[in-house]
Amino acid sequence: MYSVFTRCRLTLLLLCGFFFLSTHAFAGEKVLDVTRLGHEAVSLTDHFAVFEDPSAALSRSDVSSPEFAQRFTANQKPGQALGFSYTRSAIWLRLHLKNPGDKPVELVLDIAYALLAKVDFYQPTDQGYQHIEAGYTRPTPAQALASRFIALRIVLPAGADQQVYLRAETPNSLNVPASLWTSEAFHAHQPADYAVQALYFGIVLAIGFYNLMLYFALRDLSYLLYVVFASGVALALANFTGMGAEFVWGVAPVWSKIGVNVPAALASVAMLLFTRRMLTTEQLVPRIDQWIKLFIAANAASFFLLIFWFQEFNPFFVTMNLVTSLLILATGVICARQRQRSAYFFVAAFSVLFLANALTHLRNLGILPTNVFTSDGMQIGSALEMLLLSLALADRFNKMRRERMDAQTQALRIQGELLEKLKASEQLLEARVADRTAQLQLVNQQLEALSTTDALTGLANRRHFDTVLANEWARASRLGQPLALGLLDVDWFKPYNDHYGHQAGDDCLRQVARVLSGSISRSGDLVARYGGEEFVFIALATDLASATTMAHRVCESLRCAGLPHALSEFACVTASIGVASCMPGQGNSAEALLRAADRALYSAKRQGRNRVVSEPAV
């Protein structure tokens, strides 16, 4: 009997102890009365009891056993989300729900975070526990509602008082922004939520397409860098907000895991390059420019490190991404203080983004209420940032256009001045060329005259005579006119030269030339020195008789000149002349005419000199 009493006493003590432990464990947990839900969502953050499983191996039956049940701690931190940063642990959440009404209540458990790899929901039923599997590594469960996040339909029976469990595990940052809706309120909220998302991605698409067209039109790399930046941010937010998984790529575990930070690394590289070009940091702030180059290399390396070693490198990248943003903002502030025009847009754009990020975090901490500005702050801030940066590009384009127009105006002015100088130079050059041309023509005429004039007598030389004879022969032949020719030789000139000297001889030849030129003075006739003491004349349109008369006039004029010649039979300088004339045509030639005149000359010499002998040319 004593043993039975002892056993009863021990059993009572154990039950009391268990009751005490259970009461102590659950004392801090809040009970949520679902009948009091209204048109707004109720955050479950401060209703959860939390247990961290470092091994990630415990099951629902394990954590609900007395051994682990007491390890759950009530969350005392207000806010919209439970945050556990980067952890390899599995997080268990316990929620106490109560439905005191007489009708079942249909609820929606909304976890507004798309980067949870595995989410397990456990709800007690008559047969045990209902288990729902969700997360980006799993197919969409039948209990899930159409949503960009995890939205599970829950039915709480009438009079139910239940403890449900949530298990969350992910290689990404582990956050659980869970809230509870009535079914009607959730469906009423969805259209407005999707409208905000559609507006954001529509703005990004329009801005990106517009700047891409500007790049193809202007070939300015700044526009392409901006498009890459906007695309990277939009892609990251599409993954972060769940819009991409719902409407584009569906269940894609690998991409969902890396799809926020990998595009963010690409966007950081593009923005840093964009910053260097827009703010001209290499010239304006060269020391900061070296840091920007370093972060470009670091973010480019992060792009590949996140692809292959995501879970190991991701925590470091988050810190580096924050420092990168601060570096860009600081660069903008420093350049703005140096009155760099584009820097004003930079500072405004990144200030808006940082403000939006701060509002989102303050909302998650429960300091600010949930509204469109706090729940969708990142999208609003990102859209405003892109619009402001687009304005920066537009301002840069206008500035470049003004500079180009100023440069064109200056170039036109300089071109006008150069044109005037060129015209003046051309006029001066033309005057100089005309002067030089005139001088050259004069020199050419002089050279031509020298080349056709005998230097001693000033008459035409033998070369010029030959040319004129050939030309006049052809003209006379064409016109059918006679052509006469006379050869003159100074009588006894060698004895004269020997007796009086070469100087006197040259004077004698010049005197003979003057007499000959004075006697043969018709226009078109030619008098030339043939060689030595021989002279020749060409008489145009002249028959043999007229040519003979002309030759007699020459001999008479020479005798009248009375040039003394002591060794001459006539005591003065005389000349013998042979004259020939013919009608140019077939059967004769200019050479035959010249030979006939030469024969007549020798005949005059044989007959005693100082006479004229004529002979027709055959």
Image (cartoon, grey):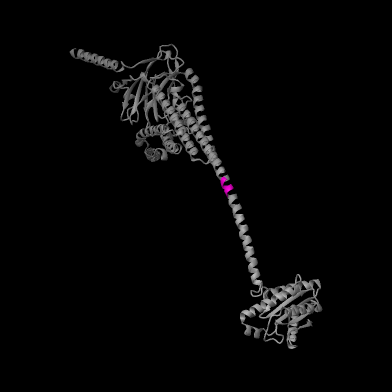
Is 581 located above or below residue 264 in the figure? Answer: below
Q: Nearer the viewer, residue 131 or 79?
A: 79
Total of numbered circles in the picture? 0
User: Does residue 381 sit above or below 618 in this rendering?
Assistant: above
> Can the viewer see residue 358?
yes
Expressed as whole percent of the image width and height from the top left, the position of residue 26 reads: 31, 17
Question: In the shown orientation, is residue 472 left or right of residue 120?
Answer: right
Q: Write down the region rendered in magenta.
A: 417-421
> Where does the C terminus fall, quadrant-wise?
bottom right
Image: 270 above or below 32:
below
Q: Is residue 288 left or right of residue 213?
A: left
Residue 457 drawn in magenta = no
Residue drawn at x 51%, y 22% is 191
Find residue 454 and report its horizontal and vertical position in percent.
65, 74
Q: Is residue 340 above or below residue 435?
A: above
* 359, 174: nearer the viewer: 359
Q: Please tell me in which quadrant of the rendered image residue 108 appears.
A: top left
Magenta stretch, overall SS: helix
The quadrant in which the N terminus is found is top left
Q: Report if residue 212 is visible in the image.
A: no
Indicate the position of residue 112 as horizontal and vertical percent values: 43, 25
Q: Quadrant of residue 477?
A: bottom right
Viewer-side residue, 493 vs 570: 570
Left/right of residue 363 with respect to residue 403 in the rendered view: left
